[in-house]
Amino acid sequence: MELDVRKQRILKAIVQDYIATAEPVGSLVLVERYSLGVKSATIRNEMAEMSERGYLRQPHTSAGRVPSDLGYRFYVNRLMPLPMIQDDEATRMRTAVASASSELDAIIRRTCQMLTSMTRLPAMATSPDADDTELRQLFVTPAGSDKTLLVLLFSTGRTEHRLLPSVRVTASDALLLANALAERLVGLPLGSLRAIAADKIPPPPEISVLAPAWSALLAEAANAARAVAEATPVFLEGASAVLEHPEFRDVERLGAFLSMLQERAALLEMLDYALDSPDVTQPAGSARPAVQFAIGEEMRRSDLMEYALVSSTYYVGDRERGTIGVLGPTRMDYTRASAAVEFMARTMSDLLTRLSIAP
């Protein structure tokens, strides 16, 4: 839904004030701190209407309002100031990354460290191997009278074997299943494989009688992809930075968040999803890298509904090689986060490109 100019000004002020203070924002605060040109009663009415339309929410009956996921999304897409990095800071960051060494892991790790220093948020990045991994071949064969063996060969050379004790197929059925699965799965990247769902990829009509085996094999293919993902390097720096945010004064919430950061497969899934997000902010004057936002419910996991991810792709030459981003509470400074993520993605891309063509 569209918001008129006055509502947009009020929403912008609420988002910025809440980001700065972590306190619900009331109409009196807006009158005192911002030149909105209207009285407190008018602001209250506008806030009530925006709450009804889903842009704001009220944590407590007597409290002010805070932005909802929809409110943050509107702010990011329409109201956020132009992200910028000052020249002196840019020089320091480039120097710090360039001094890491010429080793890929060291460059990625240092870039994440600098990103955390700029945003005070945990920073993460995939390695090029994670982005490149795809399924090359698969085989299905009977294993005795009451088992079926699924074998998957990935582009990294890793092989995953899955024995399905509840699936019984003949040799000819196994060949039909293998061919149909290969047609749909071979060539898919790791992220797409992990996200496959049996109910969304029905078997072709000619093997519809093998639907139970088809569903079981698809599920095991997704499990195998998750196993490969767990072994794929994901760089994480600055987990302790969350201690600076009031959202993590709750020990249980802090513990759950830190535990999630140790789940490499979960981090990969988040970063993979960010690449597919249709909501992209393109930096001015450049074709790349763009910045993606996943906010609250857009994170697609029930345990991440109170968090947001700001990420971007990094390149070597013209080829996408991985993803880098920051994760934190939805009450984050999106302007600063997007500026820092875009800048560090560009800095790493430039350095890796120079190293790849160096004699």
Image (spheres, grey):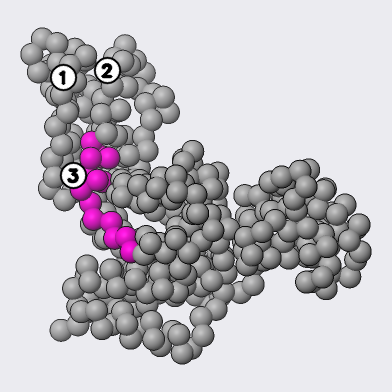
Amino acid type assigned to the residue bearing label 2 in the image? Ala
Asked whether the residues under the numbered discs 2 and 3 touch, taking CB atoms below 8 Å apart as contact, a structural biologist would say no
User: Do the residues under discs 1 and 2 have CB atoms within 8 angstroms?
Assistant: yes
Residue drawn at x 42%, y 28% as measured from the top left: 200
Q: Which mark is residue 213?
A: 2
Amino acid of disc 1 = Thr
Report the residue marked by disc 1: 148
User: Of the residues shown, which amino acid type is indicated by label 3?
Assistant: Phe
| Image-quadrant location for residue 238 | bottom left
Between marks 1 and 2, how big is the CA–CA gap?
A: 9 Å
Q: Sequence-wise, which precedes: disc 2 or disc 3? A: 3
Which residue appears at 21% of the width and 27% of the height? 178
Could you tell me which secondary element the residue under label 3 belongs to? strand
Magenta stretch? 224-237
The first of marks 1 and 2 along the sequence is 1
Q: Locate the C terminus by quadrant.
A: bottom left
Q: Secondary structure at mark 2?
A: helix
Q: Relative to 146, is 88 on the left or the right?
A: right
**For residue 154, which numbered disc appears in the image?**
3
Question: Does 238 appear in magenta?
Answer: no
Query: Could you tell which of marks 1 and 3 lies nearer the N-terminus?
Result: 1
